[in-house]
Image: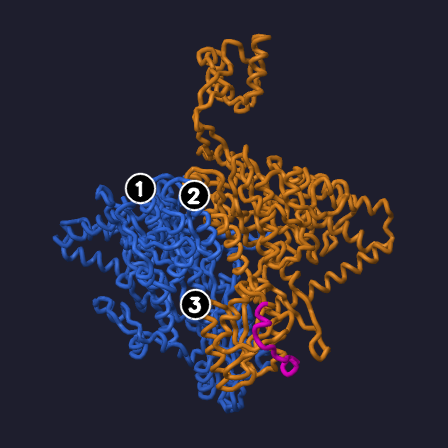
Chain colours: A orange, B blue
Amino acid sequence: MAAAVAAAAAVVNREAFRQAVVNTLERRLFYVPSFKIYRGVAGLYDYGPPGCAVKSNVLAFWRQHFVLEENMLEVDCPCVTPEVVLKASGHVDKFTDLMVKDEKTGTCYRADHLLKDFCKEKLEKDLKITEEKASEFKHVLAVLDDLSAEELGAKIKEYGITAPDTKNPLSAPYPFNLMFQTSIGPSGLSCGYMRPETAQGIFVNFKDLYYYNGNKLPFAAAQIGQAFRNEISPRQGLLRVREFTLAEIEHFVDPEDKSHPKFSEVENLEFLMFPRQDQVSGKSARIIRIGEAVSEGIVNNETLGYFIGRVYLFLIYLGIDKDRLRFRQHLANEMAHYATDCWDAEIECSYGWIECVGIADRSAYDLRAHTEKSGVPLVAAEKFAEPREVEKLVITSVKKELGLAFKANQKMVVEALEAMEEKEAMEMKATLESKGEAEFYVCTLGNVVTIKKNMVTISREKKKEHQRVFTPSVIEPSFGIGRIIYCLYEHSFYTRPSKGGDEQLNVFRFPPLVAPIKCTVFPLVQNQQYEEVAKRIAKSLTAAGISYKIDITGTSIGKRYARTDELGVPLAITVDSTTTVTLRERDSKQQIRVSVEEVATVVKEVTDGLNAWNDVLWKYPTHSAAATED
Amino acid sequence: MAAAVAAAAAVVNREAFRQAVVNTLERRLFYVPSFKIYRGVAGLYDYGPPGCAVKSNVLAFWRQHFVLEENMLEVDCPCVTPEVVLKASGHVDKFTDLMVKDEKTGTCYRADHLLKDFCKEKLEKDLKITEEKASEFKHVLAVLDDLSAEELGAKIKEYGITAPDTKNPLSAPYPFNLMFQTSIGPSGLSCGYMRPETAQGIFVNFKDLYYYNGNKLPFAAAQIGQAFRNEISPRQGLLRVREFTLAEIEHFVDPEDKSHPKFSEVENLEFLMFPRQDQVSGKSARIIRIGEAVSEGIVNNETLGYFIGRVYLFLIYLGIDKDRLRFRQHLANEMAHYATDCWDAEIECSYGWIECVGIADRSAYDLRAHTEKSGVPLVAAEKFAEPREVEKLVITSVKKELGLAFKANQKMVVEALEAMEEKEAMEMKATLESKGEAEFYVCTLGNVVTIKKNMVTISREKKKEHQRVFTPSVIEPSFGIGRIIYCLYEHSFYTRPSKGGDEQLNVFRFPPLVAPIKCTVFPLVQNQQYEEVAKRIAKSLTAAGISYKIDITGTSIGKRYARTDELGVPLAITVDSTTTVTLRERDSKQQIRVSVEEVATVVKEVTDGLNAWNDVLWKYPTHSAAATED
């Protein structure tokens, strides 16, 4: 019970902290609900000026850290996607959530959310709960993602869960496709969707990209763009939205060689990992060296390990707290059947551990699916230095006999015979030799037919081959940019007392890389001389490519510092003479005096990361803060 | 007739040139039709690696040139937009094109396109056309945009125009809304559209942005993002597509003061302008100084003139040929009724003069429309230093009398009375005084009612006012990024004979700012020493933030230069020793020798624009090209 009380207190604290962050973010226009003057639309948000700048900084760094560093092939494909593409990828049939409806009002809810909320509420707030019941609820939460529509429906009934807003009874759960549907062209006959991910645009271009890369593997393609999911009932602010920016990488490799030439550059990184085995056996995440994780087989291969390491560096450079970042391996039941291995970069925030980056080895699934549906082979070839002798399965159907036996169905039987895999074919050969005939299921007929010995010859023959043709595997790091940014906001936020101690001031400790504005310029008092100096400095900042803001309001300098700290601006220049100015750093509040001519250069050095603040600090005279900060 | 022959020859030349450019662009993956393996979707294109890099360079420069330089407030709003917003903006009712259907197959065509094609074809290819007919067709082309559905239909009938693919008869023209429609949320009840422009996201946020700017005018907000138009029959490649990137600026000003503090920085720019008056009187575009255009009232105001100048500079820096760029003023019939003045930056390419940037003074229309529909006042206030005495219209309705006369309709009559404008109210006052009653149309009732003298008092009273509240005007420069990029491709493309003279080689003369890759690295021959030097150089290029490509194929260096010229890469480093390398410039083919240590710095100086190629040329020994270029 003490545990339950503590848990409840933690929830209250988390929510108070979140409220403080979100209030600051909305008040300073980092983001606001979209179309607010029309009472908004759930799950749609606008980034205002500082949020938009943070986002564009994060994306520029992503390009630098991944695309430029790895020479990736960046592409830019449309959001509007014809049905055939998303049919092949499986989205039309399977990209669904289970939904329940309020039987009286018709309001829709996500079935798993209702069950999750119910169990969590019981665990956190019901102080009289039995041990047995508590472990039952915990179990439900653990297997939530695995429950079928029937199982979810049964639980909802068993627990008597009703519509949260009205307490009305709920319908049985049924699948709702999460894609925004539209119609392409004027005829109304051509169905399309807004893409739910950017990856498909890369897969369908594989052939051209492989050619562009000189027909060589491995290579990676990348795409940044909008993706759309028509969530049933969006919540959790920026974490579950209906339109969001994804940044995705598709790294194509030979399935027989998933080593990575630059793995040695990351292998000594250590960070929190949460392997499948540890999750199943109830352990906690622990610090593992990524080199060890790969060599011990915890992470399936070097390329996957390389990207995990690079993602770690990316997030840390942005300012994500490494103690609240872990790489969690998917459990067997979470992973798609075709995936080889999958790790999520999860970041802890007030909503719990949030999946922000998925890093999956998806094997050859996507390219095969599009090959099959489009008829265009999306394959790679390895040319042999010397021709190699290989044993190959050869299936020759005897068309005359098959024609006599199957008449109009002959073509389908022939196709099915020749499409047999090694194992199936060799079993048929054995059966034909022992019994003279074999039962054979032809899926295009939906029927079992009898194949006689004289209808087909199956053999293994030696052949000389000059190349090996194969479908590449793809390793996919996929970044939810909005989620990363939201977690970054929480990790960067802190409060400190004002000088008088009468109020708490908000600060975002963004690294210069991320900060929406690098520097503010404050003329200490409103006079023409200072304003002209401020303008001169502004010009030199623009020339140096540094984003800045001038604040010429007559407000006290302390209030102006507080305002700029709240935007996470790392440096502030106070114009308090016509020759030298005060340069103040946000977190330490330390101040130095720099000449008007030099100040843009110093700001550039610090914000470009060429010099740390501590390096410039000793070079210039310090300035006593007592007079100014209030 | 000679003129017709010359025109036909020009068409052939233009088409041959376009074919050469487009072939190169598609072969080198600047862009390709989207979803090609599924036979594509008309009007959707993917940017491949070089095209994507060009686009991201153009956008980065746009941010630098406009957002950073002018301290604009950049925002980022969703593409999915609820119906109410686009109802207010007028898009739901008016964003249509006139469509005709093939009466047998149902294939859809844009009615104006068919008529335009017919007239153009006649003018260009019909050698027996009479003077009279020719001037009729020219007139139709001139007024094409003004024709109503009925007029278009009549012309199509008169000329006997049939469906181009089948020669079947066509339906009468009818309007087709160009927005992609979708449904937001699971209920299916909430209609939404993919935004046809980014501007609305800014307008609906006006109140917050004005507050963010310290409640001060003027200020500008900007947005870069995808926009969508479900074109009836897309054609002209990248010029008319169903999804495209817009970059829009909404500059809000006091309608009583449209001066611009930085106008003096552009006033001496001279370029091709095509004022309305010159178009109407059949003159050609001519070079005008923008300062003169504003002072003579050709351009309505300084702010509009300032942006025209800035747009000119933007396009020129990108590499648009200034002789094929003009600013054309909208004719009275082209302009929306509320617009004050509107100029298009038109770029000439093989398709003719193409509108690439629109620069419009839209007055207060958009903010007023959203104020009215949302009920949230989107206004600004100017505080007076001293309170001012103003005469104001005061309308007081006598509710008791109105209630007796109109009963349940009283509220609507009161609202209509109190909403009267100055002129209408003073007329009613006069009528009431002379006749004792007045006829009054109440639009919410759809009826005329009789207002008696005792029902309302109308007067002008003197009041002290402390501020003036008004709806700001908006000046909107709107950039079609894809169109600018396509025109840039045509303006940058040229061919030159190979050294042997046996073939024509393609070159894009992109300025470094735009070039997809700044530099290529070629080890002259395949050996380990050279490849290691190449890797060292590559590392220093990455550190300097320069995008590059290494080509280690054994192909001749001449072929490798040709390949890289075709991508528009400005500089190539050939590793032909372990201490110094050859640095070659694309257009002049001049080569200098630079040390391995220095080369990244030299490349950075040239590609960042700190030094022109001609400035570095004399600093380093030249290298004889004879041995290498073939």
* Earlier sequence position, callout 1 versus callout 3: 3
Label 3 SS: helix
Quarter of the view holding residue A495: bottom right
A493 to the left or right of B521: right
Residue B529 numbered mark, or none = 2
Mark nearest the camera among 1 and 2 is 2
Mark 2: few, some, or many residues within 10 Å (few <14, many ≥20)?
some
Badge 3 or badge 2: first in the primary sequence: 3
Q: CA separation, marks 1 and 2?
A: 61 Å
Q: Are marks 1 and 3 on the same chain?
A: yes
Rendered location of residue B331, percent (x, y): 30, 67
Percent position (x, y) of residue B413? 54, 75
Q: Secondary structure at mark 1?
A: loop
Amino acid bearing label 1: Asp
Task: Tell me if B389 is positioned left or right of B144 in this view.
Answer: right
Measuring from the top left, give residue A627's x and y in whole percent: 64, 83
Q: Which mark is residue B382?
A: none
Q: Is residue B199 visible?
A: yes
Q: Amino acid at mark 2?
A: Gln
Q: Residues within 10 Å of mark 3 (few under 14, many from 20)?
A: some
Magenta segment range? A615-630
Give the x, y percent position of residue A252.
Answer: 51, 40
- Residue extending farthest to the left is B2
The Cα atoms of the two marked residues, 1 and 3, are separated by 45 Å
Say whether residue A619 is magenta. Answer: yes
Which quarter of the rendering shows the C terminus of chain A?
bottom right
